[in-house]
Structures are given as structure tokens and as C-alpha cells.
Amino acid sequence: MNVFEVRGGNRLKGEIHPQGAKNEALQIICAVLLTPEEVTIRNIPDILDVNLLIELLAEMNVEVNRVDRSTCIFRAKDVNIDYLHSEAFCKKSGKLRGSVMLAGAMLARYKKAFIPKPGGDQIGRRRLDTHVIGFEKFGININHNEEDGFFHLSAKELKGTYMLLDEPSVTGTANVVMAATMATGTTTIYNAACEPYLQQLCKMLNRMGAKISGIGSNLLTVEGVNYLEGTEHTILPDMIEVGSFIGLAAMTQSDILIKNVSVPDLGVIPNRFEQLGIQLEIKGDDIHIPSQESYTIQKYFDGGVLTIYDHPWPGFTPDLLSIVLVTAIQAHGSVLIHQKMFESRLFFVDKLIDMGAQIILCDPHRAVVIGLGRERKLRGITMSSPDIRAGVALLIAALSAEGKSIIQNIEQIDRGYQQIDTRLQALGADIRRVQK
């Protein structure tokens, strides 16, 4: 098992390029199943979750030409549908939450799909209701097999319909949009997710011949077509990495230039870090975070303590709340972090408390961070990464701490962050991947 051995206290300096967006890549790669023609995808992040999905497609008999680690040409000409009901698929997809989005594309093209128990992060209950209810609206038959644990989905045809999603789930919206592209008639999806990742998927589908309107809003209209053709697509920079690097720069008093971030697609992310008192300089499509001796958390106009919470787009993404929480540790002032969507995502704060942070875990969804204001440093400890985002939050804490930290279970970090150790070493971080 590999671990990260981190010696904190170094001020970092230099340029870093964010990888391609993980959450977008998972949707886009599933969408290649919609056409028998070639689909070229660029700026693919070279991370465990995405590589696992590409392996799944190859095992489904999709032709995969990995031109390089960031570019792939797919051709889903003769898909092996039965593989989706195999023990091998169940085992591999159980490690990957994003595999659920294979269903929408398979239903659109083949009128048949299987969904195993969802995998991925252990950050609380991640229900499939939005997916299942949406599919039922098309007239799809859904049966849960107790013996194999799969949902079995089939239909003679998918009929366009109106649906009000019970929550603006990104993966749920992606699934029903892909299914709707080749349904008979028109599908209207209200309370749809409208994250940039979803917008990217819809734009790609339109280039393939789909007819989707309302892109960027929570009301999507999809007119079904009979055939989708091949296309080319470039994945956006990962906004979660951008936010992670902003937090890293602030905590380690570093001078970092984040290159080619696609500023228009970051939404409120820069604003939330500015609320923590972090200076940001947007230069074209780059973000410069200068070295800061201190930063002070803003208060509300009436003097109340700031609350930062997650919310569907264009609100603040839940994937960055762990980063905001750890960044607040060395700020002046206090902030309430309210994680609404997942009930276990704040359960890594005990490790931060062991490092010397002042954090009150109010309940599974809320934590109060009382900033140390750099009056004392965190201390290095041995800890384990519970999920992707908490893992990087702990890594940021370790890089700012005094002494040596050991981070175990770093496979969780590798699932979402591409070669994070070597990229941070280039900035001057003392981090080593060690086999234990």
C-alpha cells in the first residue's frame, strides 16, 4: 500500500495547470455509447476513476484508441450488452459511482441496461431515485433483482415525456438527457441540473445531432432523433482542482499561478474564497494567488458569523466544502460550514482537530471553524484519506503543518487528482509517495 509522506512548512511557488474535469469526463465518456461512429475526447484527466470507466468500455467491446494519456478515440460499433450483467462488470462498476450513467446511453440506443449498486465515495447515502423515477417516465420497465443486486431496465421504445426531477442531480440529469436524445417525441426536464459539466454534455450531444434547448437553465427540452453521429470534444479544466489550489496557496502562504482555469465556468468559487479573505488576481484566464501573511474571514453586514454552504449550480459546489473548511483553519475569524447534501462528508475533521485545528463538529452536516490566525501551526500526524475531497483537504493541512505527516489510503486521492504528488513537488512541496 502506498502512502504520502509529507513534511510541511514549505512556501510553494510557480505555475500549475488544472487537469481536465473529472465529473465532466465521466458523463462525456459514457455518452460515446450513443453512436457507432468515432468520438474523440481531449483533456481527459489521467485519474483512477476515469481510467476505470475507460477500461469498462473496452470490456464492453468499445474500440478504445488511447492516443496519449489525455486524448482518446472511442468507437462503440459492436457493444457487448450482456457484459453489463456480468459479475466482472458488477465488481468493477461497484468501485465507480459514475458507471450509473452508462444506463442512459444504453437505453437510448439499445433499449436495455443494467444498474448495479452504486460505488464511489463513502460520504453518505447516494440514492438512485432520480435516475430510476426519470427512466420510469419514459415507459421503461425497471425490476430490482434481489439475487444479483442489479436493476434490470428494458423497453420496446422510449417515449418522450414531461418530468419534474425530485432533485437537480447532476448524474441523474445526465442520465435522463442521454436517454431522451433518441426517445420518440419531446421530453421536458424541469428542475434539471445546470452545472457547466451538464452544459458541456448537452453541447456535445447537439454536435452529434441531438436537439436539446434550454442549456444552462433548469428547464431542458429534448426532441428525440433517430441517430447520433460522431464528434470531437474537449473537457473543461477541473473547477475542484482550481479551488483546491487556491486553498493550498492560502494555507501554505504560497505564490501560485493557476493557468487556463476557464474563469467563466467557475461561478461563485472565487467569491467564496474571497469571503475567507484570500486575495485573488484574475489575469485573463489565469488566477494568481499572491503569498499572504494573513487573511481574515468576512462577516455579514450585521456582524453575524459567515456561513458557507453547498447548493445546486449556480450555487457553491459541495466538492469544495472540505477545501474551504481546511483553508479557514489558519484564517482570522470564524465560519460555519454547512454540508447539506452528504451526511458523512465532514467526518474527517477529527484528524484536523488532532493536528491542532479549532473545529466544532455540530452534527453530521455542520462544523464551526475557529481560525487560528497563524498564532500556531498545525502539527504533522498519521491519518487516512476517507474520500477524494477530504483526502486533498488533509494533504493541504499536512503541507501547512509543522513536522512530518503520513497520509494513508491515498488511492482515494488518486481517484480524483492526477499525479498530485509530482505536480506539487514541481512547486516546491516536500511530498513523497512511499510504499509501506
Image (cartoon, grey):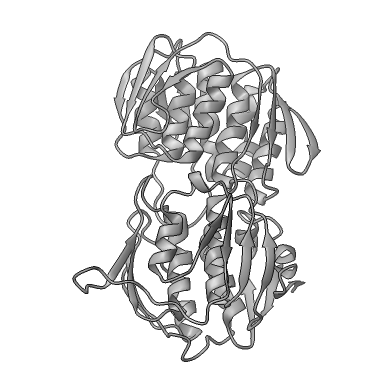
Q: Quadrant of residue 420?
A: bottom right
Whether residue 409 is visible, yes or no, is no
Instruction: Tell which of 155 and 166 is nearer to you.
Output: 166
**Picture coordinates of residue 298 (x, y %)?**
33, 71
As drawn, 217 above or below 237: above
Query: Relative to 293, is 312 on the left or the right?
Result: left
**Picture coordinates of residue 235 (x, y %)?**
62, 39
Instruction: Tell which of 156 and 159 is nearer to you.
Output: 159
Q: Quadrant of residue 88?
A: top right
**Picture coordinates of residue 131 (x, y %)?**
40, 33
Query: Relative to 165, is 197 on the left or the right?
Result: right
Instruction: Tell which of 274 and 122 is nearer to you.
Output: 274
Query: Relative to 313, is 196 on the left or the right?
Result: right
Residue at the (47%, 72%) spot, across then down: 326
Q: Quadrant of the C terminus?
A: bottom right
Instruction: Tell which of 85 and 390 is nearer to you.
Output: 390
Residue at the (62%, 54%) spot, across then down: 415
Q: Quadrant of residue 155?
A: top left
Whether residue 204 is visible, yes or no, is yes
Q: Quadrant of the N terminus?
A: bottom right
